Image (cartoon, coloured by chain):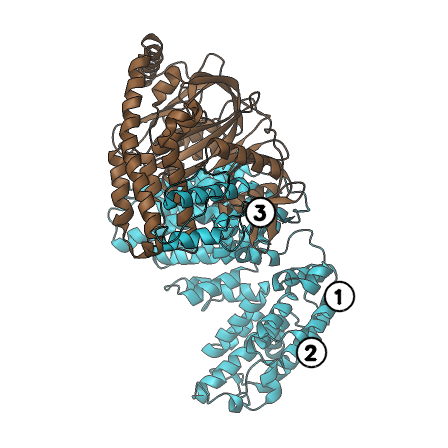
Chain colours: A brown, B cyan
């Protein structure tokens, strides 16, 4: 849980924000044990020009003779980065977490001097960032060549999707009644074929088809998903006839992704004051942890999704802090939704974002579906959200009594924080999972990440 | 549309009509199950003409699916009643961090931390409430402190989650009688309401109990009613307790008896004195000058007053040896009778009584039990000071659990300083460090500076070699010191242990004391 205090001008993070970085409960626990000043004979804060914290470093007494050298670079262009000389594979490791926790409590002093290892790491990061920025500017990708590469990829995928089309029709022609008797291989063969055709997005949609008919209403569920696949295939195969944005959505959904470098190099750039609505985590079909961070432009009203991934045992990066606002440019993927953080963004605390009622939230979801019918989660901000209950379970209601079912993972946290009083709430909405809260703002305007 | 949060893909519910296209989703599904090779699919207006049946079916399916998602209709639900009270001020960041450290790695300090918090008049950050309630649900001992620490917000929150309902029974400062809770509430809320009333108006509380009594069919519920009498027990409560001695439930009778001990001037106490006087024979010159005659096994009055069951009604006597039954009755009688009967009868001081009952183990043990039960300081001192059975004797051998319990009871009525002084006086006489550990846990109070210094001295004694038992005892002693030594006595502890092999425990002890010291400072 993360509390950002608006009234506090310090850029120091709260301890909760630090713990939110912990990859898992055990590293949190381990870090708490080293989070005492006595374990850190040497440490320091490196200030940026404006006086804000640029980096924190420290040397931690370990069991061995050499101390562990831990550091965190907080104002890097791509969000925070961490380094530690310990052998742990977790990022950030317990030493970095402990160091940041001490810093968040004001137990790490600013230091003029910095050890050589810190200076070296920071300057290395600096020059890499410059190289990356310079590279994009100096040598833009040859547009013709890029278009040819993309065309070739699209054609490979098209071959796979043609096969998928025939396969889909075969399933429906033959009837789905047999599905419970078919094994895993039945879907898997088609999925593998799609992976070979470089259509990983379509492949994972096939893998996620209900297998062995499990669960209630499986025929309904299966037919829905087959329908959505059918729409994807038909849409993709007609890609020459649709507008550029729809085509980009289709590309992204079948699995033709755009590299972040290319997005930064030539993607659409939108300048705005981006309100960080919050983030929720999920799992990708191949077991990676993913974090969806949602932003909304204060002027443009544009919604942006920033994705970060991490292997199991690690926490995906948080490129933005929930409840703050970041002024500057976001670079958008061709689908117009997914975005990448650019170099020059300044973050600051802010007041709660404007929100609406539940009908408005549902309208915006429907609007987003028109652009991308495969969309699962969509961010909504309710300005008068209040916990409600019926015989069927928990809901979130607006001031008119309209309500959406609540995804109950954060129920107690929400109730404890609000006391059942109305609050501004940013949440992800999906008809499938319900309303999954990300951030709420209390009476004093403090943001609380859930 | 029938969209329920309990079935995740609500829009998939086939039993309801979906949208207004005229497409019957149920028919689509059944066609898909049978197969479009065997059944044709009509093309509704607005959709492209398809040559393949399968494509036509999937077209319809996707239109319906997206329509259901995009056309999701909001439900209606009534907001819950909000927490009506203003929460106490929350603690700051440093204190909240301290709590996190305790929750993650030092759970043994949680009770102490909560206690400090409650005394500081603040409450935990609201976001920590669910975690604390979960812990208190698992650990009964934490409940009173957690109830106070989570404040009214926590009690309100617990109302929504059954496993947390225990919290609604915990009395809170400023509780007032809530008639609605008493008349319609859960057993926990009823208990709390009754307690609040008893605290303000004992007589009104008693009336409520009397009225509720006949309606409580469960013995446990009647015992809980009696339970609420304890904090403000007074002579007027005796008729109620006396009546409870006739209850059909053994635990109700037992609880009534133990509460009656708190009314030494009552009719019940006088009856017990009478029973005892009638059965005591004093023969001044005999080796055992005081003798207690066998209690008549069939005296129904006596058995009732002692909450015992008569021998013949006992179901096939589990314990067939009459000797043991006598013993039990003697014990129960002596333990529950006011101690003044002894000083009057033998016309001597409490110490004199203990000497005169002499070597009769049964009598003496029962009297000491009575002293422990009543918490009488004069008698407790007499026992502790007694040359043959006093504290120095008790700690001379190994201190088993029963004895530790007894030491704890005897020390409890004395002022803290006196308790610590008494322990200091016997530190050198305990049989080994393990016994010292047991005596120190029986003390069950923060130590005086002098006692801390003495324990530190024991810990710092240098030794050449230790047996495994010694090492274990040393570790135990460090753990006990970490728990009971007031953290401001940290300065008494040397930086390093004189014995290298104990350096680790020593550092741990210092570390815990320093941690507790910070904890006290933060919440002072």
Residue A447 is situated, as x and y percent measured from the top left of the image, at: 56, 32
Chain hosting mark 3: A
Q: Bin the neighbour count of mark 3 within 10 Å (Cα to Cα): few under 14, some 14-19, many 20 and up.
A: many
Tell which residue pokes out farthest to the top in this image.
Answer: A138
Image mark 2: chain: B
Q: Of the residues under marks 2 and 1, which one precedes in the sequence? A: 1
- Can the viewer see residue B426 in this picture? no
Count of marks, rendered view: 3
Distance from disc 1 to disc 3, alpha carbons, whole Å, reads 42 Å
The Cα atoms of the two marked residues, 2 and 1, are separated by 22 Å
Give the CA distance from mark 2 to mark 3.
60 Å
Residue, disc 2: B267
Cβ–Cβ under 8 Å for marks 2 and 1: no
Where, by quadrant of the figure, is residue A396 drawn?
top right
**Mark 2, secondary structure of its residue:** helix
Q: Which residue is mark 3?
A: A395
Chain name for mark 1: B
Q: Nearer the viewer, mark 2 or mark 1?
A: 1
Any mark on residue A267, and which? Answer: none
Q: Secondary structure at mark 1?
A: helix
Q: Quadrant of residue A152?
A: top left
Q: Is residue A292 left or right of residue A179?
A: right
- Say which of A397 and A213 sits in front: A213
**Local secondary structure at mark 3:** strand
What residue is shown at x 44% (from left), y 67% (from top)?
B402
Circles 2 and 3 on the same chain: no
Task: Report which residue position mark 1 lands on.
Answer: B204
């Amino acid at each position: 849980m993360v509390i950002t205090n608006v009234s506090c001008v310090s850029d120091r993070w709260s301890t909760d924000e630090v713990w939110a970085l912990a990859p898992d409960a055990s590293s949190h626990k381990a870090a708490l044990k080293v989070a005492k000043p006595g374990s850190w004979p040497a440490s320091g804060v490196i200030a940026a020009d404006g006086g804000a914290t640029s980096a924190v470093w420290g040397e931690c007494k370990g069991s061995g003779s050499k101390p562990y050298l831990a550091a965190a670079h907080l104002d890097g262009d791509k969000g925070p980065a961490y380094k530690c000389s310990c052998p742990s594979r977790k990022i950030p490791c317990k030493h970095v977490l402990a160091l940041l926790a001490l810093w968040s409590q004001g137990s790490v002093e600013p230091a003029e001097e910095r050890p050589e290892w810190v200076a070296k790491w920071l300057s290395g990061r600096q020059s890499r960032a410059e190289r990356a920025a310079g590279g994009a500017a100096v040598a833009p990708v040859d547009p013709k060549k890029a278009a040819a590469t993309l065309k070739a990829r699209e054609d490979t995928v098209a071959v796979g999707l043609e096969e998928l089309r025939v396969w889909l029709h075969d399933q429906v022609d033959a009837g789905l009644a047999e599905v419970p008797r078919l094994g895993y291989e039945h879907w898997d063969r088609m999925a593998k074929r799609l992976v070979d055709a470089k259509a990983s997005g379509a492949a994972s949609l096939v893998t996620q088809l209900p297998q062995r008919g499990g669960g209630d209403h499986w025929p309904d569920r299966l037919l829905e998903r087959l329908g959505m696949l059918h729409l994807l295939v038909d849409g993709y195969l007609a890609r020459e006839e649709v507008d550029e944005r729809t085509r980009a959505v289709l590309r992204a959904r079948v699995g033709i992704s755009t590299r972040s470098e290319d997005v930064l190099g030539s993607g659409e750039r939108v300048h705005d004051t981006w309100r960080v609505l919050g983030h929720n985590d999920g799992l990708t079909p191949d077991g990676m942890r993913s974090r969806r961070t949602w932003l909304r432009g204060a002027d443009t009203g544009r919604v942006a999704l920033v994705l970060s991934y991490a292997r199991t045992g690690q926490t995906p990066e948080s490129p933005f802090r929930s409840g703050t606002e970041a002024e500057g440019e976001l670079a958008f993927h061709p689908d117009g939704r997914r975005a990448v953080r650019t170099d020059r963004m300044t973050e600051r605390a802010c007041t709660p974002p404007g929100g609406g009622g539940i009908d408005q939230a549902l309208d915006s979801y429907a609007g987003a579906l028109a652009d991308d019918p495969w969309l699962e989660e969509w961010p909504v901000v309710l300005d008068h959200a209040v916990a409600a209950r019926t015989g069927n379970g928990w809901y979130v209601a607006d001031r008119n009594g309209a309500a959406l079912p609540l995804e109950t993972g954060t129920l107690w946290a929400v109730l404890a924080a609000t006391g059942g009083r109305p609050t501004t709430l940013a949440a992800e909405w999906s008809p499938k999972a319900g309303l999954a809260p990300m951030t709420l703002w209390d009476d004093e305007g403090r943001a609380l990440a859930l | 549309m029938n969209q329920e949060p309990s079935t995740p893909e609500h829009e998939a519910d086939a039993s309801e009509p979906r949208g207004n296209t005229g497409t019957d989703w149920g028919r689509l599904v059944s066609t898909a199950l049978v197969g479009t090779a065997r059944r044709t699919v009509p093309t509704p207006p607005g959709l492209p003409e398809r040559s393949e049946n399968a494509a036509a079916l999937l077209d319809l399916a996707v239109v319906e699916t997206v329509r259901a998602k995009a056309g999701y209709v909001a439900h209606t639900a009534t907001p819950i009643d909000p927490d009506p009270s203003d929460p106490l001020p929350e603690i700051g960041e440093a204190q909240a961090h301290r709590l996190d450290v305790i929750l993650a790695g030092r759970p043994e300090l949680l009770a102490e931390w909560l206690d400090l918090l409650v005394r500081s008049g603040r409450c935990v950050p609201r976001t920590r409430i669910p975690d604390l309630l979960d812990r208190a649900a698992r650990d009964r001992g934490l409940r009173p402190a957690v109830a106070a620490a989570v404040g009214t917000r926590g009690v309100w929150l617990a109302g929504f989650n059954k496993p947390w309902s225990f919290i609604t029974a915990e009395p809170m400062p400023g509780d007032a009688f809530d008639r609605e809770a008493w008349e319609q509430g859960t057993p926990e809320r009823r208990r709390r309401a009754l307690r609040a009333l008893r605290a303000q108006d004992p007589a009104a509380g008693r009336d409520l109990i009397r009225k509720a009594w006949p309606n409580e069919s469960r013995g446990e519920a009647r015992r809980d009613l009696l339970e609420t009498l304890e904090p403000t027990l007074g002579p007027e409560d005796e008729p109620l307790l006396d009546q409870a001695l006739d209850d059909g439930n053994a635990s109700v009778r037992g609880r009534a008896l133990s509460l009656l001990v708190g009314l030494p001037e009552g009719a019940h106490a006088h009856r017990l004195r009478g029973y005892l006087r009638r059965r005591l024979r004093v023969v001044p010159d005999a080796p055992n000058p005081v003798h207690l005659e066998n209690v008549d096994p069939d005296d129904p009055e006596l058995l009732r007053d002692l909450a015992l069951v008569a021998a013949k009604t006992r179901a096939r006597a589990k314990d067939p040896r009459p000797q043991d039954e006598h013993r039990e009755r003697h014990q129960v009688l002596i333990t529950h009778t006011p101690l003044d009967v002894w000083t009057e009868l033998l016309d001597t001081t409490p110490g004199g009584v203990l000497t005169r009952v002499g070597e009769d183990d049964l009598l003496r043990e029962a009297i000491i039990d009575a002293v422990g039960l009543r918490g009488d300081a004069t008698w407790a001192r007499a026992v502790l000071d007694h040359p043959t059975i006093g504290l120095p004797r008790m700690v001379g051998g190994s201190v088993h659990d029963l004895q530790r319990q007894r030491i704890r009871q005897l020390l409890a009525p004395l002022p803290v300083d006196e308790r610590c002084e008494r322990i200091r006086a016997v530190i050198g006489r305990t049989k080994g460090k393990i016994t010292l550990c047991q005596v120190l846990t029986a003390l069950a109070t923060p130590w005086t500076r002098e006692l801390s210094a003495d324990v530190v001295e024991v810990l710092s004694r240098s030794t050449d070699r230790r047996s495994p038992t010694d090492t274990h005892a040393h570790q135990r002693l460090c753990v006990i010191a970490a728990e009971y030594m007031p953290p401001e006595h940290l300065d008494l502890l040397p930086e390093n242990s004189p014995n290298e092999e104990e350096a680790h425990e020593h550092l741990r002890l210092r570390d815990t004391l320093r941690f507790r010291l910070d904890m006290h400072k933060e919440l002072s």
